[in-house]
């Protein structure tokens, strides 16, 4: 036995596996920002589904073009992956994917030809995709026009296990730069290109599935996310619902929109006004789970209701960033460095296929007095009573 072997030979046969942790210092370990006794490379949880993600979108004000970027590190899986994707009205959606071994240095945010540069934290960032076999390339700079707005912590349970436990903050801003893709190219300027930055970290299901013993209940998830930009402010609404429409997480926010990043106040947590709650109503295209139109009610602390109508203009498939992708799913080990790309026609997709139900749509917004623009992100998977969905992926009647 192991104990006898140790006594007889003075050696532990598991010594190659049981040892003190390796040194894992990062550049930011030089700052007084630690939350645990460990270096920053060590998350405060050993859950294999821990992730740390940066995500951006951009769209022009006539809703004819949209691009998006995502990059994440999965420390316990030893993976970093990233993607960039673009779609123009009436055209194909083009996608670049990259995946590799996560670097020890967390300030190294690059995967092959794709990289994210934080020029000034909470103010300015740059996304670069050098020329590659996908035919996609970009050099884009995001300039914030709002404070960083922290969403309420999102904790969702399945039985006694946390299915999701994450923190997210958002910023709204403008873009400059260039994008080229297999069907053309376009310039991006601050006068007409808007967008949202989304930073999140915590636990959510990613990568290869971890066996957990006895099977659990059938999966069901309703998610709606609606960041909108108006003339002098932004609104934001977030919804996670259970299968009967019960609120698992629900939030509405309003925050000022500033003329430039220099005008953003340093008191980041004091600029957003939090609503008492928010309510959503969605009409779906027949035989799909895709929103044909939607309405949001933002209800303030005094019961005043602001109703916002949303009219979709342009659809973006989130699998273009790896969400639900059959080959380029997020957090999946694909080797030391793997690069890929694809182009597809959104109009020709089966919208009830598992990898196609997660979408963002550029939307025109109206509250009866003002006009705005933004996106409506939605994912409805499994039964959802308010929409009449009864099975895993049936469509609206």
Image (cartoon, rainbow, N blue to C red):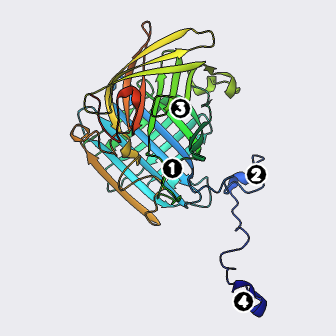
Residue 381, quarter of the rendered image: top left
Alpha carbon of mark 4 to alpha carbon of mark 3: how far?
Answer: 63 Å
The residue to which callout 4 is attached is 5
Of the residues tagged 3 and 1, which is closer to the observer? 1
Q: Position of residue 308 (x, y in %)?
A: 44, 15
Horizontal side, residue 153 vs residue 208: left or right: right
Residue at the spot 29% in from the left edge and 30% down from the top edge: 396
> Residue 278, how many percent across, how many down?
53, 20
Which quadrant would the C terminus be assigned to in this image?
top left
Residue that appears at 51% across and 54% down: 110
Q: Secondary structure at mark 4?
A: helix
10 Å neighbourhood of mark 2: few (<14), some, or many (≥20)?
Answer: few
Whichever of labels 3 and 1 marks the residue nearer the N terminus, that label is 3
Label placed on residue 40: none
Residue labelled with disc 2: 36
Q: Position of residue 21 (x, y in %)?
A: 71, 67
Residue under numbered circle 3: 143
């Amino acid at each position: 036995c192991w104990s006898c072997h140790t006594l007889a030979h003075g050696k532990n046969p598991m010594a190659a596996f049981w040892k003190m942790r390796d040194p894992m210092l990062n550049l930011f370990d030089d700052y007084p920002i630690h939350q645990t006794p460990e270096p920053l490379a060590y998350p405060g949880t050993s859950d294999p589904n821990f992730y740390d993600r940066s995500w951006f979108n951009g769209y022009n004000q006539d809703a004819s073009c949209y691009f998006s970027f995502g990059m994440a590190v999965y420390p316990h899986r030893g993976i970093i992956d990233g993607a960039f994707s673009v779609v123009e009205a009436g055209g194909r959606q083009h996608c670049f994917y990259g995946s590799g071994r996560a670097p020890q240095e967390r300030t190294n945010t690059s995967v092959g030809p794709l990289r994210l540069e934080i020029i000034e934290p909470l103010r300015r960032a740059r996304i670069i995709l050098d020329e590659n076999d996908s035919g996609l390339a970009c050099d884009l700079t995001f300039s914030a026009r709002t404070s960083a707005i922290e969403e309420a912590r999102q904790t969702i349970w399945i039985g006694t296990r946390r299915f999701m436990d994450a923190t997210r903050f958002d910023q709204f801003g403008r873009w400059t730069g260039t994008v080229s893709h297999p069907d053309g190219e376009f310039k991006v300027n601050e006068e007409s290109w808007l967008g949202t930055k989304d930073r999140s970290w915590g636990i959510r299901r990613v990568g290869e599935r971890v066996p957990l013993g006895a099977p659990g209940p059938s999966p069901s998830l309703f998610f709606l996310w609606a960041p909108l930009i108006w003339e002098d402010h932004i609104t934001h609404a977030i919804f996670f619902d259970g299968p009967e429409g019960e609120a698992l997480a629900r939030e509405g926010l309003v925050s000022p929109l500033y003329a430039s990043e220099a005008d953003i106040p340093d008191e980041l947590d004091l600029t957003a006004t939090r609503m008492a709650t928010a309510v959503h109503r969605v009409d779906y295209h027949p035989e799909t789970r895709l929103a044909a139109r939607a309405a949001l009610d933002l209800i303030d602390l005094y019961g005043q209701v602001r109703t916002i109508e949303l009219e979709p203009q342009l659809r973006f498939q989130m699998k273009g960033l790896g969400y639900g992708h059959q080959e380029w799913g997020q957090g999946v080990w694909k080797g030391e460095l793997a690069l890929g790309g694809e182009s597809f026609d959104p109009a020709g997709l089966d919208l009830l296929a598992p990898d196609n139900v997660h979408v963002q749509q550029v939307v025109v917004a109206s509250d009866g007095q003002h006009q705005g623009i933004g996106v409506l992100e939605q994912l409805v998977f499994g039964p959802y009573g308010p929409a009449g969905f009864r099975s895993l992926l049936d469509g609206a009647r």
